[in-house]
Amino acid sequence: MMRSYTHLLSLLLLISSLLISGCATNNSGFKISQLAKTDIDTVTDAHITELKRLNRELAAKLYKRNPGN
């Protein structure tokens, strides 16, 4: 009888530690939209975001240089 309580307590401790550790990684930047993405998709999205930012920066610089045309 005592052995079953020990197994139950061990299982409960394992489950609660997994749940607590899952809550501790809240600031990892995980989004639900990234759930089905592969690493390649995530890297591609990062590159696209960076290219869009650089494109806006370049357009602003070119406009400041020649605003009349």
Image: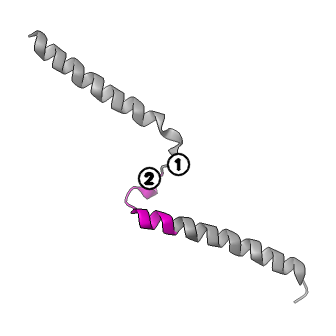
Query: Farthest residue in the right direction?
Result: 68
Residue in view at x 45 percent, y 57 percent: 33
> In this image, 13 relative to 42: left or right?
left
Labelled disc at residue 32: 2
Residue in view at x 87 percent, y 90 percent: 69
Name the front one of labels 2 and 1: 1
Read off the residue under disc 1. 29
Q: Which corner quadrant of the image does residue 37 belong to?
A: bottom left
Query: Farthest residue in the top direction?
Result: 2
Q: Quadrant of the N terminus?
A: top left
Labelled disc at residue 41: none
Residue type at mark 1: give it. Answer: Gly
Magenta region: which residues?
31-44
- Residue 26 on the magenta span: no
Residue in view at x 69 percent, y 71 percent: 54
**Mark 2 to mark 1 CA distance (whole Å):** 10 Å
Residue type at mark 2: give it. Answer: Ile
Q: Position of residue 19 (x, y in %)?
A: 36, 32
Q: Position of residue 39 (x, y in %)?
A: 42, 62
